[in-house]
Image: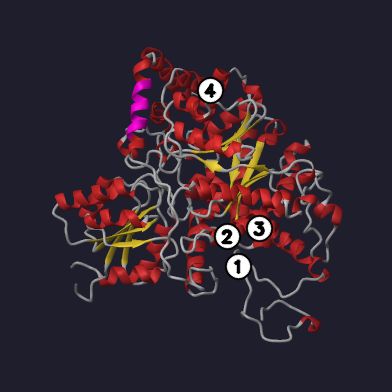
Amino acid sequence: MSESRKIKVLVTKPGLDGHDRGAKVLARALRDAGMEVIYTGIHQTPDDIVNTIIQEDPDAVMLSMLSGAHNALCPVIMEKLKANGIDDVLVGVGGIIPDEDKPLLKKHGLQGFYGPGTELKEIVEFVKNNLKR
Amino acid sequence: MTEIDENKTLKPVKEERKEKFRNLSNIDIKRLYSPEDIKDFNYAMDLGEPGKYPYTRGAYKNMYRGRLWTMRQFAGFGTAQQTNERYKFLLEHGQTGLSVAFSLHTIYGFEADSDKALGEVGKEGVSIDTLKDMETLFSGIDLSRISTSMTINGPASILLAMYIVAAEKQGHTPDKLRGTIQNDILKEYIAQKSWIFPPEPSMRLIVDTIEYCTKYVPQWYTISISGYHIREAGSTAVQELAFTLADGFAYVESAMERGLDVDDFAPRLSFFFNSHNNFFEEVCKYRAARRIWAKRMKNKYGAKQPESLRLRFHTQTAGVSLTAQEPENNIVRVTLQGLAAVLGGTQSLHTNSFDEALCLPTEKAVKIALRTQQIIAHESGVADTVDPLAGSYYVEWLTNKMEEEAEAYFDKIEQFGGVIPAIKANFFQKEIANASYKYQKDIEARERIIVGVNDFQLREPCSTPLLKIDEEVAKEQVKLLHNVKNKRNEEKVKDTLRKLKEIAQGTENLMPFIINAVREYASIGEIISTLKEVFGTYIEDSVF
């Protein structure tokens, strides 16, 4: 992508989990790193998220999930993106994702996994270095 | 050195490890405290005897010499049947009270087969749809002999109604029941985010439960005014203290506006605080909380009964302080946090399990957490005397300081016109977002050290066994719900829901009508949907 345009990131919380501390801290860190950040707030269904991606056209999407619903929700989000012809958005996930669940999520196209204790700059670098467009 | 004025004899003899020593509320801590720091200290007025106004030293005269705190581990996952087995395990190992964690779909009032419940059923707590699940949850547990805390807010009145009817089916009248519903909606808008309705109808439901319990369930604690979630969302200790007590004052004012006598309902309000890493800060927070509450209840609200002035609280150790790195270290963190709660005079305690940054707690981890409390209680000797830290220059100074800073927040909230206007202006939400961002930045700048995370790291693979909730749980729960719906009397369900809607449109107390609907096996989802038709829902601005 061109140097002049800001990287645009969507930070979102799928499902009913209300623990939004991590999502908000990350949103702020990405903004402080010079990116344009949209935070959807909590309680987003897969359809809500895909619709926001279609409207906002972000370069990257960071999902925040702590409730254990990732195996049910992430594949649905990724399938719906594919069905809408969207394949150039980087998707990462933060929260509590056990190692054994990662292969399945990777197969569906999720790239970065960031658990408790991750430094914000690590996620900022992930977004900067893995963009697909 | 800090700008704090120290006389020459107290000057440090050599350079110190850090330029500034700050606690988690960002209060500067001096090298040494002395009588100079508590010059106006007056034992009778500032502390008083334990069990006497202003209750700084403790809610009760004998404290743990009389009765130890209630060891109450929060638990719930999967179906009611699975959680019932965990409760029996905990009771067999010496736990003395139950504490129910509900599944997210229950917390928001959606049925297990709703689209909104996808992936959530039984993951974070026990899945409850109807009275039938509640009967299973407490099957084989005598509800007249145990106290039960239920962490439920939006639908608190419905879960309480289910508990009352489940007990009735065991043969117990409501006056025998002991326990707590969290029922603290204000902190949901502020921090935890599991609201359903807008603030005003939510406050009505809360006052309805207060009024109902005052008459019919007199041993029930009607609100657990909670700082726990405010802290977990990233507030400082001072913010936790101030925002929680401000919420408490708002509930008192709402109930008084309904015409209730403060001394009739205040004895059944309780509190719920966090215990984080900074040991003395936590102890002082609890001591300050008791003093602030007693003063305000007496001087502003005119409460006269000691039970109205006495702040009682539950504590849970800080989930957010647990690390996924070297999880066994969490056992030590939890021990220190639990110890702070006990030295601060808690009435009940949940100690977190060491594996909770990775998954729901396994049975082994839960047992260690409970054993931690038993060791503090029976081996350490800290429970042998009341408020053993009183009189320390540092502890009394910090208790005063926390009270002062909380008072400054009360003034700010007052300027917004109270808690609800301050929520609508995103005041609390912004304060918390700023504090949590600063905390994270401090960690990344290594101004605060978290062992195994930003210092002393070992990159070894994690080998902790994890508890996983099978996706089959959702199918099982949906089957249970459909079975109930096939067996119940649909006409009666519809009648009770119609009546509930009619009452919701007026001002009469909703509790008896919720109980009627529950008794006919109306689901939480159906009851909440009915109330939403009248009350609407709440949508927040997401500030970060």
The crowding category of the residue bearing disc 1, from other C-alpha atoms within 10 Å (few below 14, some 14 to 19, many at least 20), is some
The crowding category of the residue bearing disc 4, from other C-alpha atoms within 10 Å (few below 14, some 14 to 19, many at least 20), is many
Which badge, 1 or 3, comes first in the chain's sequence?
Answer: 1
- What amino acid is labelled 2 in the image? Thr
Q: Is residue B228 left or right of residue B343?
A: left
Question: CB of mark 1 within 8 Å of CB of mark 2?
Answer: yes
Q: Which residue is mark 3?
A: B282
Mark linked to residue B26: 1
Question: CB of mark 2 within 8 Å of CB of mark 4?
Answer: no
The crowding category of the residue bearing disc 2, from other C-alpha atoms within 10 Å (few below 14, some 14 to 19, many at least 20), is many
Could you give the CA–CA distance between mark 2 and mark 4, rounded to whole angstroms? Answer: 40 Å
Where residue B128 appears, as percent x and y from the top left, is 44, 31
Query: Which tag is nearer the camera, tag 4 or tag 1?
Result: 4
Magenta part of the chain: B475-484
Q: Chain of mark 4?
A: B
Instruction: Please identify the quadrant where the C terminus of chain B is shown.
Output: bottom left
- What amino acid is labelled 3 in the image? Glu
Which badge, 2 or 3, comes first in the chain's sequence?
Answer: 2
